[in-house]
Image (spheres, helix red, strand yellow):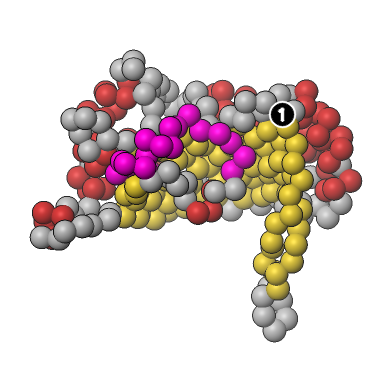
Amino acid sequence: MRKQDALKLERSPLVLVLSQIRFPAVLKMHEYIETIQDALRGQGFPRFEEEQVQQVTFGGPGPKVELGKRWAFSSRDKTEAVILAPAFVVYETSKYDVFETFTKRLSPVLDLIREQTKTEFAEGLGLRYLDLIRPTEEQTASDFLRERVRGLSQEDLGAKHSRHQFITQATTEHGELNIRCFENTGPEFLPPDLVSTHLEFQVDLDELAGETYRILDIDHLTKTEVDFTSEVLIEKLWDLHEYSSKAFCASVTKDAIEFWKKEK
């Protein structure tokens, strides 16, 4: 499935990778949770949480906010987790190796959900990569980015202060590719929609308080309807991964990649 060599970075800025697979809602999902939880414990996800979440539904005179449930299964070291809801499943990790490893962990989760819920097809897939690009003593975080992604500097504008944000939306042969890059300072480095993650990160949050860093957020989505089998779904995720990898290499400099390849 791989069309090019894996990009192994010893100092990788990657802090989070997640995949979401959406399927027609299983209203009796709560009835399968006990069996699913027992199986996921055997797959390396012993931690368990049941959560109440708000859901917005449309119909009638206006939107309606309802409470729903989702279930989170995490590894002991909290570096990977499975989040299951009636209409989707997410696998996320803060300890990414290569995509082969990622799909190897995801595949049995998908097999389990199909077996227990009899789900026949998926309605959409997404793959998301989040990089935390930090400065060094010699370089700013922006120096690791290609000029087209950096934005206008304070010197360009004659401004006392500036905060950069870059957004590109593209249509690929497989779906919608979104590339977002923004500048930030402080310990809250996750985008707002990801703050509920169940993972712990290998990041010293105190160090971020005094840094100006960049977040590179690459999200590739498809709404293609496909059979809910691990083989088909993993193949589709490989298609999304190929473009996500291209987006990363198009956003950062060659010198940045060489720097991240070196051992710490």
In the rendered view, does 221 fall on the left or right side of 54? Answer: left
**Residue drawn 52% across and 27% down?**
95
Q: Quadrant of residue 142?
A: top left
Task: State whether residue 55 is above or below residue 143.
Answer: below
106 or 41: nearer the eye?
Answer: 41
**Residue drawn 67% across and 26% down?**
76
Q: Which residue appears farthest toward the right when viewing the image?
A: 31
Question: Mark 1 is on which residue type?
Answer: Phe
Residue 239 visible, this angle: no
In the rendered view, does 188 fall on the left or right side of 86? Answer: left
In the image, residue 122 lies in the stretch drawn in magenta = no
In the rendered view, does 82 fall on the left or right side of 36? Answer: left
Helix, strand or loop under label 1:
loop
Q: Quadrant of residue 32?
A: top right
5 or 202: nearer the eye?
Answer: 202
Q: Which residue appears farthest toward the bottom when viewing the image?
A: 61
Residue 257 visible, this angle: yes
Task: State whether residue 143 is above or below residue 54.
Answer: above
Q: Which residues are magenta?
A: 197-216
Which residue matches tag 1? 45
Task: State whether residue 118 is above or below residue 60.
Answer: above
Q: Where residue 167 sits: x, y (%)? A: 35, 55
Q: Where residue 134 sits: x, y (%)? A: 32, 36
**Residue drawn 78% across and 23% down?**
42
In the image, residue 200 lies in the stretch drawn in magenta = yes
**Residue drawn 34% across and 47% down?**
185
Q: Where residue 88 sits: x, y (%)? A: 69, 48
Q: Where residue 102 sits: x, y (%)? A: 57, 28
